[in-house]
Amino acid sequence: MARDSTVDHATLRLIHQTAQAGNRGEAVVLAEAALADGLEHPLLFNLVALKLEEQGQLLDAAALLERAVVIAPSDIGVRNALGLVWLRLDRPADALMQFTALLRLNASLPFAHASLGNTFFALGLIAEAEASYRQALQLDANHGVALAGLAHLASSRGAYADARAWAQSSLAVLPGFPDAVMSLAAADLGERRVAAAEEGVRSLLEDGRLTPLERAYANGLLGDILDAKGYTDAAFAAYALCNGELRELYAGRFSGTGNAFTFVRAMIRHVDRAPPVAPRPVAPSSEPRPDTRRTGAAGHVFLLGFPRSGTTLLEVILEGHPNVVSLEENESLIDTVQEFMQRPADLDRLASASPATLERLRAAYWRHVSAVGIDVFGKMFVDKNPLNTLKLPLIARLFPDAKILFACRDPRDIVLSCFRHRFKMSAPIYELLSIEGAAAYYDAVMQLTVRYSSSFPLETCLIRHEDVVTDFRREMKRICDFLAIEWDPAMADFALRTQHRESLTPSTAQLVKGLSTEGLGQWRRYRPQMEPVLAMLQPWVTRFYYED
């Protein structure tokens, strides 16, 4: 039956008036009834989706808002709401589609530019995020979300004075805004105003409006504050609370039988049954390798290890050399992973892969490198991604001439540091949300690395983080000799360069301070909490020469 437009308009008018009068609960009830009766309108979808968001039913909210976008693609409100839901669901690529479409409809919306900035930040596109925040402020100098975004960027870079100014400006507009409160607390902590930092975070944790993710991050920051006060028992409890909340939030995506730890263990079992076949050696030739001819790169280096092992420090040091360019944690090997590493048995086909297949996958790798703006011509290219350690068979087959820098650090410090830091979530990072899980995953990755290292004739240099920070010149001279490059004094200026890097990691705020031994042996302060995993880590303590 055809709908009665007069009745529908009256229904929508009533719902709108009810919402405008502040009776949102009643408006939602009316909207749900209208949707059940078959009436579809952006106002109805938006009201009901907002209720679902508040109840934590984000996927259901997204489904309603997607339907609203279909029937009203030019409606600014539903596109903005859908983009915000995708951000909360940690799906920034989907959010990006909505906010870019929104800005095509109207480029003068400051809130859309601010939300786009948050999206770029979630995607790791830091320069683009900063530009979007600043564009929002050009349109509205008091836009609280954009101000908070710049505060977050500044605190992540260790620019605490700037972070404080941006955060205070945001809070003047949006009192109690969680992102601004946490950036201000991070600035206080960075400047050793520990009491002020604790007061701010504890006040925030009393706010019942916090989302689960905001509450998790606030507890993690509280852990950092308590650690700075020397209250290790309370700090560990705060980290555990943070990580427990994160585990619950991301369980649907990263737990279960197909998790990252299970995959690595399956790889170990497969390698033990059938050790990988090393690629056939290529006869020496005066001709440059096809890969070198294509890219013009002067050299190719993979910087590997494990999260929190010191790879970022090494990368920023090396990129100070005039003949070195680097790329940080980009999935440039993704095409090869999809073809030869979806399941352990896939590796069996790798050794016999045809030259045409290998050439296609090399080309795909270099396309990914080029797509992010890296020009390797005439340069030594450093591809830094700690967990590319798992991909050593792929590296050996595609790039047998590449050199490997393998970063290590006291395994006990690595595991504790992984547990204490908040990373962008992924399947491997999910394994680090408990001390036991972090230790087990580290142990499994190292076991697989040892097996790979004995199978593939890759030129490898082991670098201990402790040696870099305690005997910098000697250790960097050794690394430069391995890479066949001359030491350049500019390489020592990494702290200054870090302030202006477009990428941010949990190490950034530390690196701007220069070399520091402060993080060495931190695990001893948490020995009671580390006790359950010390026996598991002991073989690696011995192997990497960290005996007490």
Image: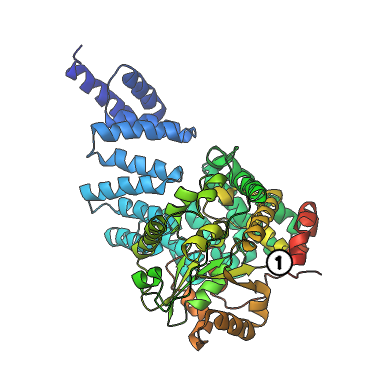
What amino acid is at disc 1?
Answer: Asp
Task: Choose between 414 and 180: the one closer to the eye.
Answer: 414
- State the count of labels: 1
**SS label for mark 1:** loop
User: Which residue is located at x 52 percent, y 87 percent?
Assistant: 487
Measured along the vertical axis of the image, is residue 268 above or below residue 41? below
Task: Choose between 401 and 448: the one closer to the eye.
Answer: 401
Q: Quadrant of the C terminus?
A: bottom right
Task: Choose between 548 and 172: the one closer to the eye.
Answer: 548
Residue picked out by circle 1? 410
Residue 247 lies, in percent from the top left, at 60, 43
User: Which residue is located at x 65 percent, y 50 percent?
Assistant: 268
* 435 relative to 456 in the view: left or right: right
Measured along the vertical axis of the image, is residue 41 above or below residue 188? above
**Residue 426 visible in the current orientation:** no
Residue 399 lies, in percent from the top left, at 47, 65
Label 1, residues with CA under 10 Å away: few <14, some 14-19, many ≥20: many
Measured along the vertical axis of the image, is residue 50 above or below residue 481? above
Residue 79 lies, in percent from the top left, at 30, 41
User: Which residue is located at x 54 percent, y 50 percent?
Assistant: 347
**Residue at the limit of the structure toward the front, as seen here:** 283
* 172 relative to 447 in the view: left or right: left
